């Protein structure tokens, strides 16, 4: 795990412990993620993050609303995957970013307890994941 990832993980845990974000934490996140953290905060502020959890397993995935006028929704795992174009272009292909704004929005909403929680059966979750 890179030093940046360790710092980010520490910040997420700190936010989760208080369910709030300080200016210092936002500054650190901005240093690590640039403008993507600003975009992610807008998505969270607009309640654009849903955590879809399967029952009874408790497994989950995030569905995050994009910022375009079409309000596309992207399935993502906060730590390591997003179905958006930016994830494949900027992160996987070019290696220029650590994660996309949708992953950041999922991490931030999760840490703040600001996700819209949706419970489905494990079978429904499996069908959703099969579309990835």
Image: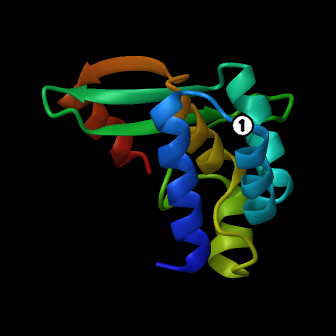
Q: Badge 1: how crowded within 10 Å, few (<14), some, or many (20+)?
A: few
Residue 131, position as x, y percentages in the image: 42, 45
Dividing the picture into quadrants, the one containing residue 88 is bottom right
Residue 35, position as x, y percentages in the image: 86, 53
Identify the residue under disc 1: 22
Q: Please tell me whether mark 1 sits on a helix, a strand or a loop.
A: loop
Q: Please report the residue visible at 61 percent of the width from the left and 28 percent of the height from the top.
A: 20
Q: Please report the residue visible at 50 percent of the width from the left and 58 percent of the height from the top.
A: 9
Q: Nearer the viewer, residue 11 or 103?
A: 11
Q: Please report the residue visible at 84 percent of the width from the left and 35 percent of the height from the top.
A: 68
Residue 119, position as x, y percentages in the image: 31, 18
Q: Count the marks.
A: 1
131 horizontally vs 30: left or right? left
Question: Quick check: 56 above or below 41?
Answer: above
Question: Quick check: 112 above or below 36?
Answer: above
Q: How is the image coloured?
A: rainbow
Dividing the picture into quadrants, the one containing residue 117 is top left
Question: Quick check: 34 above or below 114?
Answer: below
| Residue 39 in sight in this render | yes
97 horizontally vs 110: left or right? right
Q: Residue furthest left?
A: 56
Dividing the picture into quadrants, the one containing residue 121 is top left
Q: Nearer the viewer, residue 17 or 113?
A: 17
Residue 49, position as x, y percentages in the image: 58, 28
| Residue 76 in sight in this render | no
Q: Nearer the viewer, residue 90 or 71?
A: 90
81 horizontally vs 85: left or right? left
């Amino acid at each position: 795990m890179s030093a940046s990832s360790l710092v980010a993980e520490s910040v997420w845990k700190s936010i989760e412990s208080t369910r709030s974000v300080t200016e210092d934490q936002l500054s650190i996140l901005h240093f690590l993620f640039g403008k993507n953290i600003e975009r992610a905060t807008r998505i969270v502020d607009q309640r654009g993050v849903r955590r879809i959890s399967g029952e009874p397993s408790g497994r989950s995935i995030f569905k995050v609303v994009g910022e375009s006028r079409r309000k596309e929704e992207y399935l993502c795992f906060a730590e390591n995957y997003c179905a958006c174009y930016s994830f494949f272009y900027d992160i996987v292909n070019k290696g220029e970013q650590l994660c996309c704004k949708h992953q950041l929005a999922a991490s931030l909403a999760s840490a703040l307890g600001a996700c819209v929680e949706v419970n489905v059966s494990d079978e429904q979750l499996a069908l959703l994941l099969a579309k990835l």
